[in-house]
Image: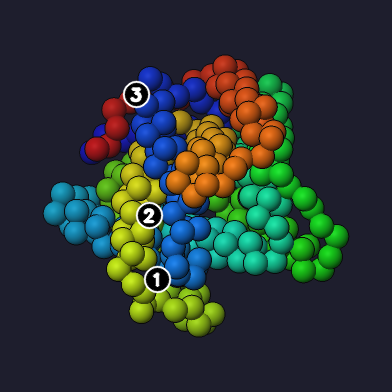
Amino acid sequence: MTVTRAPQGVSRPTGNDAVLMSIALVAVSTSGPLMAATAAPALAIAFWRNALGGAVMVPVALVTARRELAALGRRERGLALLAGVFLALHFSTWIPALSYTSVGSATALVATQPVWAAVLARLQGFPVGRRVWAGIAVAVAGAVLLTGADLQVSGRALTGDLLAVAGGAFAALYMSTGSEVRRSVSTTTYTAICYSTAAVLLLVTCMVGRQSLSGYDGSTWLKLLAITAGAQLLGHSLFNVVLRSISPTVVSLSILLEIPGAALIAAIYLGQRPPLLALPAAALLVAGLALVIHDAGRETEPSLPVE
């Protein structure tokens, strides 16, 4: 098995990785509109997308990566499990935030994910330049404008805002931990462990919160399958693929482009009109991402992926 060096600082994506990230962005952009149209509790949707994703990836890993699974060291196994914990915590904080504060505020605050990713990289001793910080600030500003954040002053809204910020931090921890795992573990093995772990924890969360996990009609199950196939298996998994060579900071920042993508899909299929600032806000997002990528150096030597 060839070891891949996954960068933790800030690194520029290659042509192939840029294509994979673009496909992943299109896939995850379907998540919001589909979740909004699915007649099931939000946390139940989070459980099913991870449970169904794990149900697909675990058999694949057992067939194609059995030797790798058996040979996993304690450190790699522990990090993959930890990434699943962070993924579950992300869903368990970000989704409830929508019940306490406005959708705009929650979406804008969870968009702080790339800021947390850069902070984590800096705490680990990896270089994060001034232009990178500037690019992150521009991109997050674009996200705030696009979501129409309307921060409210109330105890309930503050709880939701804090949950959303926590959701962004846990998403960054999920990406950073996954990047570390991907140094030596294939995407198949990693996602099988990560999604299954998140599903178990979300199941416990749903049971404690008495969330209905069944009794849905056929249309709801079809939407759950679509969310799993698109946002989970194609979107999240492809982001995990590129973590082998792209830093969590750049991946986290690129995910902000999901916001205008989801807005466009919602406008076409759900008839939801985007805000007037949609175009300039999206331009800020792209400009911020471009600034980060332009300034990004390649701090790691290229190597073959573990797949």
Q: Which residue corresponds to mark 2?
A: 227
State the SS at label 2.
helix
- Answer with mark 1 or mark 3, whichever residue precedes in sequence: 3
Q: Residues within 10 Å of mark 1 (few under 14, many from 20)?
A: some
Label 3 and label 2: CA atoms lie apart by 25 Å
Its colouring scheme is rainbow
Q: Nearer the viewer, residue 62 or 220?
A: 220
Q: Which residue corresponds to mark 3?
A: 16
Q: Quadrant of the C terminus?
A: top left
Q: Residues within 10 Å of mark 2 (few under 14, many from 20)?
A: many
Residue drawn at point x = 55 percent, y = 28 percent: 10
State the SS at label 1.
helix
- Answer with mark 3 or mark 2, whichever residue precedes in sequence: 3
Residue drawn at point x = 31 percent, y = 61 percent: 222
- In the current view of this chain or complex, which residue is farthest to the front? 271
Q: Amino acid at mark 2?
A: Ile
Q: Which residue corresponds to mark 1?
A: 200
- Answer with mark 1 or mark 2, whichever residue precedes in sequence: 1
Q: Amino acid at mark 1?
A: Val
Q: Nearer the viewer, residue 190 or 180?
A: 190
